[in-house]
Amino acid sequence: MNRFWCFFYSFAGVAAVVSFAVAPAMGWWFPAPGPSLSPLGAQIDDLFYLILVITGVTFIGVMIALGYILWKFGSGRGERATFSHGSHTLEVIWSIIPAGVLLFIALYQMDVWARFRVKSMFDQEAIAHPVAEVAARQFEWRIRYPAPGKTLQDTPQFDDLYTVNDLHVPAGKPVVIRLKSEDVLHSFYLPHLRIKQDAVPGLVIPVWFQCDKVGQFPLVCAELCGWGHYKMKGQLSAQREADFSKYLEELSNSQFDDGVPIAKADEK
């Protein structure tokens, strides 16, 4: 039985090494093929991989050490353990090293955290002209745009534009949305951009991101928000600047169309 546990822990270490080698080819990493679609997301990826390497190396080392100890001292030949008061030197070493690693990670991630969370580091043009307000509610994303050529106001205006579950933004530039919740706690999550922010009832939270690729990408809720949480899905549509402006114009025309054709001057 001792030999079994020796092979078990050794196998766990080997399996971890193999998974590191084959995971990228199997698509077991992040949802986008390749790096993140946003500059901030690329930094988040780097931070994730750094932590993964640190914890992975530690895990493999511990499994190998356990396998060795069980192999060497689990022969069942009647050896008895001896009591020791311990080594202060070893205790100091295995306290200082983890503390140093955690301090390094804490300092290393401060720039990434600040870029995403500190408003003074947001793009000032983007924060002055939010592209939309996104209101989460059970179980959909309600989106409010300003009228073409206008700036989004804190309170709804008569000419604001509305959609559900389809957030359009210009690609290749920083954009800001105002995130809020109309009922319970939700979480605004763009997995391909690595952007996640809780929508908290009573708060309006600015969220900035930049999508460098034109296309449509999932927008999901990452917080269990009720029985319909599983179907609270939308999409992010990143468009060229001209296409985004055209989209707002078409949305305005369709929303304010009363069905009465406009008479031409020669028909009056």
Image: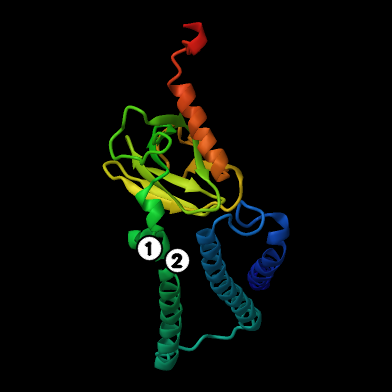
Q: Quadrant of residue 67?
A: bottom right
Disc number placed over residue 146 in the picture, else none? none
Label 1, label 2: how far apart the Cα atoms are: 11 Å
**N-terminal of the two: label 1 or label 2?**
2
Residue 14 pos. (x, y %): 69, 70
Say if residue 70 shows up in the picture.
Answer: yes
Disc number placed over residue 121 in the picture, else none? 1
At horizontal 61% and vertical 83% (from top left) the residue drawn is 73
At horizontal 45% and vertical 27% (from top left) the residue drawn is 252
Q: The disc labelled 1 sits on which kind of residue?
A: Met
- In the rendered image, the quadrant that contains the N terminus is bottom right
Which secondary structure lies at badge 1?
A: helix
Residue 244 pos. (x, y %): 53, 39
From what the image shows, is residue 263 above or below residue 55? Answer: above
Q: Quadrant of residue 180?
A: top left
Q: Residues within 10 Å of mark 1 (few under 14, many from 20)?
A: few
Left-right relation of 169 to 180: right
At horizontal 43% and vertical 53% (from top left) the residue drawn is 208
Q: Residues within 10 Å of mark 2 (few under 14, many from 20)?
A: some
At horizontal 72% and vertical 62% (from top left) the residue drawn is 22
| Residue closer to the observer: 264 or 77 | 264
Residue 268 pos. (x, y %): 46, 6
Residue annotated with mark 2: 112
| Residue closer to the observer: 46 or 256 | 256
Task: Look at discs 1 and 2 and give the one toward the viewer.
Answer: 1
| Residue closer to the observer: 126 or 40 | 126
From what the image shows, is residue 223 above or below residue 118? Answer: above
Left-right relation of 108 to 5: left
Residue 45 pos. (x, y %): 55, 63
Q: The disc labelled 2 sits on which kind of residue?
A: Val
